[in-house]
Every structure is written in C-alpha cells, then in structure tokens.
Amino acid sequence: MSSSSSASFPSNTTIPQDANQGCVGPTSPDAGRADACAGCPNQSACSSGQVQTNAPTTIAQSLDIRNALSSVSYVLLVLSGKGGVGKSTLCCQIAHTLAARGYQVGVLDVDICGPSVPQMMGVSGQPVHKTANGWSPVYTPHSHIAVMSISFLLNDPNLAVVWRGPRKNAMIQQFLSETDWGELDYLLVDTPPGTSDEHISTVQYLQGALGNVNQNNASCVLGGGIVVTTPEEVSMADVRKELNFCKKTKLPIVGVVENMSIFQTRLHQLQFTDSEGADRSDEALSLIQNNCPQLLDMIVSTHIFPVSGRGPKGMAEQFDVPYLGFLPLDPNLLMCCDQGRCFVSTCPNSPSARPMNHLVDEILQALPLEDAENC
C-alpha cells in the first residue's frame, strides 16, 4: 500500500490489495459507488456489503497484534480440514518437544467451542490474569510453555460455548492483540477442524499484522501452517480442501503430517482375550516369557485406517508441499497427552518418539531461528 493511497481513506478501514487508486475502503458508505470504484474487481462485492461484513482487520487492529507479537520469532498454525485427526495432540506435543530442546514456546488455542489444549498441556482449571500489559498466559509448571485458551475464562469447564462467528472472531482478535506472550521462539496456534470463521479470521488477522502492514518492520514471521491428516480417503478428502484454503489465502504450508498412520506398541503392552472376551493377558504373557522372552520387547504394528491411493505422501506431492513424515498411533503418546506431559521426554523408547523428534527436526529446518532473527 503506497503512502499516497493510504492518505485518501479513513485509518479504520482495510483496503483490498487489488483495489483501484483512490479507493474509499470497503466499509465506506460510498463503497462500490464512488467514482474511483469504476472498473475495480471488488466493486460488486463492496456495493453489496459482502466485503464490509467480512472485512479483515483494520490497520489499528493489525498494529495491536503486531505489537503483541513483537517478541515472537515465528507463528505456526496447526490445521486440518477434518476433525479427530489429532491436531491438538500434534500441536501440544510439538510444543512440549520444542521446549524440551530449550526453545521458548507458546500455544494459542483458537478452537473456541472445543478447547483441549489446557488438558494436553497440564494446565486445566488454571485462572488467567489481566495485567497492565494485557492477559498473562498460563505457564506449564516444568517447561514454562505459555498457554492461552478460552477454557481459562470459563467458570465451568463443561459449559458449552454457543457463539456465532462475529463473537468468535472478536475473541480470537483479543487473544492475538491482548496476550502478553513475552519473548517466544515459536507460537503454535491450535485451530478447529474445517475452513470456518476461526480459520479465516486467524489467517487474516495474522497476515494483516505480519504481512500486509509495513511488512519490512514486522519482527514476527508468519511461518505458515502444518496440515494434519490420517491416511484414509474420508480424511484426505477434507484435508485437500484445507490445502486449497491455504493456497487461496496465500498461507505458506510448512508441510503435511500423516498422523495415526499405523498402530504400534511393544508386545508386552498388549491385552490378550479369549474368544469370549475374557482377559487372558497374564497367561499369554507368561507363556511368551517362558518360551520366547525376546518377543516381549518387540514392536507390534497394524494398520488402523485403510490407506487410500498413495496416501498423504502422494497428496502432498499433488499439492507440491513438503511431506513431513508419519506419526504412529502409540498408547504412550495418548497417555502423555491426557497427563499433560512431554512424550519424547517421558517415553523416549516408545515407538512414536523417533517420528515425533523427526517431525520437530523438519519444523526447525523449515523455520530456523537465525532466519527469523535476520528479518
């Protein structure tokens, strides 16, 4: 946006990037009707009020968000078009793993109707406090990860949040602009499934603050999105929509993660039942111990979901985005999420520990801190 055009409309409006010179702004009473609107590609949308009702952040809001994130190196969104694929699990365990390696990490939960981050970070039921610098996030007790979620603002964690889009959007904008994150290397944003208001608002707010307003002076970088899927076609069909959403909104895609690609655990952790469903685990494990004890520590695997075509790796190649790897379904990983603990530190020899560390290696390679510091 040039300085000459920015002086021709009120400071509380947001101008589309492809607008004509002299644009009056989409929230102006003359939007779509002024002389400068003639021939503009946005004219019909502005005159109908469509742009006005879905307007992205104002310049003032963008500056507030940018100021709030001024000490954050990277913002990384965890996305998926499908629910139940493990976005929150991945988001929280990536945060735990980064913190275990010495990075300063924050997690923002923008799943307004289904916040699960506090439980997975081990900070459920904690209060959030307002200070002179804004909301102070809740910190995990051992790794000092900063966490913000609507769950902290609810008197009863079992209450349903029944909000329409505008109220959700206002809450997300408030989280981004009024949270005192302090100095962070990585801020991870856990999003709800789909391509709904929360996604559109979060991306618009961040792009407006970090990409569209005086970009050269923004110290925080919108690193992009990690897109999570499971290998079956029912999931990938929705995740393709998410990948298209990222491309349409020009959100960089850090890569695709294939979650729950296979079930893996050590044999001694299995439960054995007879044909009638009675538990025979002690008998079976004793038999194995007596006859072939080396089997007890071997990893057993099976596919949970039917793999469709070339799977998530092929889908990533189709969209020309990186494939960051797969993460097996591991009971120890799920246990750590329920307990709010770092999986790779608690269960370093578990089957999914190496894939989780590999995933974090890929993220660090894609978003190195030295690049952010040189921006």
Image (tube, rainbow, N blue to C red):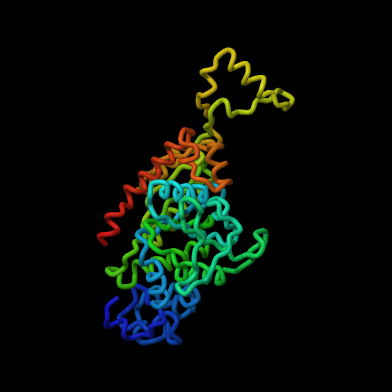
| Quarter of the figure that contains the C terminus | bottom left
For the residue pair 197 and 121, the one nearer the viewer reads as 121
Image coordinates of residue 68 in percent, x first then y, are 41, 69
Residue for point 64% across, 28% down: 271
Q: Residue furthest left?
A: 374
Residue 171 to residue 140: above or below: below
Quarter of the image for residue 212 reads: bottom left
Say whether residue 248 is left or right of residue 328. left
Horizontal and vertical percent position of residue 147: 50, 59
Q: Give the quadrant of the N terminus.
A: bottom left
Q: Who's the residue at 41% across and 70% down the image? A: 65
Q: Using the rendered view, name the quadrant where residue 270 is placed.
A: top right
**Which residue is outermost to the top?**
291
Q: From what the image shows, is residue 53 above or below residue 108? A: below
* Residue 87 percent across, percent down from the top left: 51, 50
Q: Is residue 137 above or below residue 87?
A: below
Q: How many marks?
A: 0
Residue occupying the point 39% across, 43% down: 324
The extreme front residue here reads: 142
Q: Where does the image place residue 182, in percent across and percent down from the top left? A: 41, 64
Viewer-closest of 22 and 201:
201
In-image side of 305 versus 41 (left or right): right
